[in-house]
Amino acid sequence: MMQFPQPFIQELKAQLGDEYADFEAELQQSPPVSIRYNSGKFPDFPTEDTVKWCSEARYLASRPVFTLDPLFHAGAYYVQEASSMLIGEALAQTVDLSESLRVLDLCAAPGGKTTLLASQLSSDSLLLANEVIRSRVMILKENVQKWGFPNVHVSNHDPEDLEKLAGFFDVILIDAPCSGEGLFRKDPAAVDEWSVENVQICAGRQKRILSAAMPLLSAGGVLIYCTCTYNDAENQDSSAFVVDTHQFEEVKLQWPADWGIVAKKMGYQCYPHKVRGEGFFLAAFRKTAQLDSFYYNMEKGGRPRSFKPLHKKQLKEISRWLQEPDEFSFYEKPNGEVIALLESQKNDLIVLDNLLFAKGLGLEMGSFKGTDFIPSHALALSTALSAQLPRLELSEGEALQFLKKENLLFDAPKGWLLVTHRGLGLGWVKGLGNRINNYLPKEWRIRMEIPE
């Protein structure tokens, strides 16, 4: 039986009163398992056991080995804790999702909330997924690429590095680093790491992040703040910190009573004995201060500094790999990598390229070796990929062989083939007549640990 620190028990008893016993009893149970489908790739998902606040999410009866499911590697779904999916409903209640928006997911790794935002935003909205911890950027990038949406970009910056983007964003999500109380039953080791001192450290860190983030919003912009914890120091005090700047007001959200979400003095709390999910806090704010909007002189700095337009003779070859090539501009980075930028957000991406120093913008297409084009793995997973490219459909067993980077013996036509399972791209092979070469990158080989 899991034992909790006495100060934690006292805090939750103060919040829950007579309900504390039910709360603690629930924490002794196994956590629910939930996934969220990628409707851009897998629209015909099951209809049973829906997560009430997310139409594309489902509970599973047990936790399978996701690493042995090719659909997971194809980006057909994301393994995500159900309570945290509430940010999608919060977004829908606070902005017009049909508009073209500039959105920042400030603390984005490993990417669950980023992919949720991507599924809700319009296709011409810009979503920047930022992660300050460098070691976590690669898993964020991998999950973004699996999801396959070309309007999502990645950066690796401390929030204070983004000060030149003051007024740029319409929406900012801050899934703040926290003491993790809401995940105790998923990660019992977190109980041993918990302390009152660490709660205070987290609360101070959250205020620093909020201080850096608030100026980045345009007037009327929306800030969504969330944690996976219960205590008032990280939730209520941080929310009050936002409002006390006199630049924001809280946006009250509406939830059906049967969702079990508890309204707090500010924001909303999920308790696992009331919702089918983990502990989660969320609050939404709107910027009321009429500060100057973002301005950047495109005439003076209207060229990207990190990439140059692709040579005209290469455009014909590169265009055939995308379903709608006219929606993109193509560029080459100094390392020879070709990227595609959506025309609808090209100017914004040029701004980001000039003002940020650690970023991955655009859809990675691949590179030219002489006149031959070598497609990237990210291109194989993209929803923008052409449906006319030659394909090699694999069974589940064959797909797992490919994902383990094992050799596949097929008689295949010469040239590049998109490896698919149930119609979804997994990567590239090159046909050589009597055999094929597996071009799955080494770092994408099947791993047994899947972070959520």
Image (tube, rainbow, N blue to C red):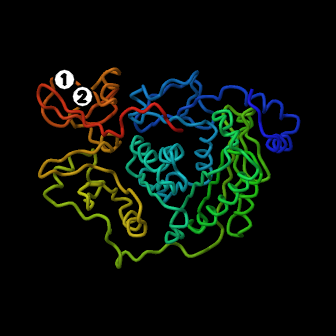
> At which x and y percent is residue 419?
27, 31
Count of numbered marks: 2
Residue type at mark 1 is Phe
Q: Residues within 10 Å of mark 2 (few under 14, many from 20)?
A: some
- Residue 223 placed where, x, y %? 62, 58
Q: Nearer the viewer, residue 105 or 423?
A: 105
User: Residue 57 occupies which quadrant of the picture?
Assistant: top right
Which dot, 1 or 2, sits closer to the camera? 1
Q: Residue at x 73, y 40 (%)?
A: 261
Q: Where is residue 234 in the image (x, y as percent from the top left)?
A: 72, 53
* Residue 278 placement, left or right of 410: right
Give the labeled residue for mark 2.
392
Position of the N terminus, as image quadrant, is: top right
Q: Which element type, helix, strand or loop, lies under badge 1?
A: loop
Mark 1 crowdedness (10 Å alpha carbons): few <14, some 14-19, many ≥20: few
- Is the Cβ of the residue at disc 1 closer than 8 Å to that at disc 2? yes
Residue type (three-letter) at the residue carrying disc 2 = Leu
For the C terminus, the image quarter is: top right
| Gap between marks 1 and 2 measured at Cα | 10 Å
Which label number is shown at residue 410? 1
At 20% from the left and 50% from the top, the residue drawn is 318
* Label 1 or label 2, whichever comes before in sequence order: 2
Q: In the figure, residue 194 lies in which quadrant?
A: top right
